Image (spheres, rainbow, N blue to C red):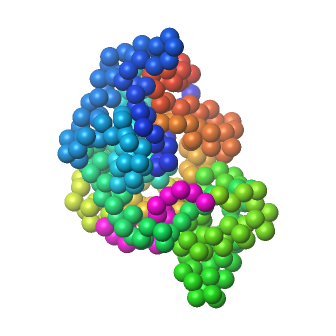
Amino acid sequence: MTIAFVFPGQGSQSVGMLNGFLEPQGDPPVAIDSRISDAVRGVLVQAGTALQEDLAGLIARGPAESLNLTANTQPAMLVAGVSALAAWRAAGGPEPAAVAGHSLGEYSALVAAGSLTLSDAVRLVRIRANAMQDAVPVGDGAMAAILGLDDDAVRAVCAQASAQSREQGEPSVVEAVNFNAPSQVVIAGHRQAVGRACDLAKVAGAKRALPLPVSAPFHASLLEPAGQILAAALAKLAVHAPRFPLVNNVDVATEFDPARIRDALVRQAWGPVRWVEVVLRLQAMGVTHLIELGPGKVLAGLTKRIAPELRASAVYDAASLQTALAEVGP
């Protein structure tokens, strides 16, 4: 069996998402090995020190309104992914043949691979979050999930909506930005253009076109200014060659040159997340089992749709950790 670690991104967060690694859960309660809880607490302390704030308290107790602010969600989700990784390693889990992360999750993957330290990464994603939020005023941008159309049909709908918006003298950017699974594509851009694309998608046969509750059009080209801020921040950080291959979002490539890793992260802020291709690339590299490290089971669920022959396990608390360890064997 050959495993890869994958890390979820923004949207999987919830108040208390690390409690299952820190205190007994369930009825009867599942005991937690102190090595696991100590490892997770160590991650929380290091991240809180780096940001000089009580990130552990926000994750544990909320409130949800604060946790869901982009500036807080991105550091919290990075820490959640790295905490699950620390728990896996503390429990003696094997190292992966490769790693990847969905959008923000790519930063957790970089920490897992030793390219970024946790302290540098958590400060970097705070800068990233603020830059992405500031690039487009709240209310001007939007995102929506298009279900039931293939990738080319979604791209065609976006092009048609953009052209119609220009003809009406309206803001006209709308693009396919997250290729999450077959017939599941997220679009983003100017609010009016996204709404127009949703209407056109339904006419084209989409099963659903769902507006998403987000504060910015993440990964749309409108966020290119955020990439420039991120570039300046990355230039000041030490970025190391990864210890094992990391398949990135924007190029579906494995890079070992720190300069190329920086460049890919900059473009990732305003380029599409090509998750279907990432999973297929991992499979082509010989991976047989994906281990999702972090809250929720989103990526494990997508894997079943992208490559049903791949096994996928989600590690989000002590119980799921033990299940995943049993599945991969000694």
Q: Nearer the viewer, residue 40 or 234?
A: 40
Q: Outermost residue toward the top?
A: 28
| Magenta stretch contains residue 247 | no
Q: Position of residue 47 (x, y in %)?
A: 26, 41
Q: Can residue 145 be seen from the camera position used here?
A: yes
The answer to whether 57 appears left or right of 149 in the picture is: left
| Vertical relation: 260 (above or below) 137 | above
Is residue 263 visible to us here? no
**Residue 111 horizontal/vertical position (percent):** 34, 43
Q: Quadrant of residue 127?
A: bottom left
Image check: 219 left or right of 145? Answer: left
- Identified at 47% across, 53% down, the residue is 103
- Number of callouts in the render? 0
Residue depicted at x 38% and y 20%: 23
Question: Which residue is at 61% across, 47% downward?
Answer: 280
In the image, residue 321 above or below residue 281: above
**Quarter of the image containing the N terminus?**
top right
| Residue 108 place in picture, x, y as percent | 39, 44
Magenta span has 213? yes
| Position of 246 relative to 261 (above/below) | above
Residue drawn 65% across and 58% down? 210
Q: Relative to residue 243, is residue 278 drawn left or right?
A: right
Give the image quarter of residue 212. Answer: bottom right
Q: Residue 114 in the image: x percent, y percent?
A: 32, 42
Vertically, is 215 above or below 5? below
Specify start and end residues of the magenta stretch as a single range.
211-229
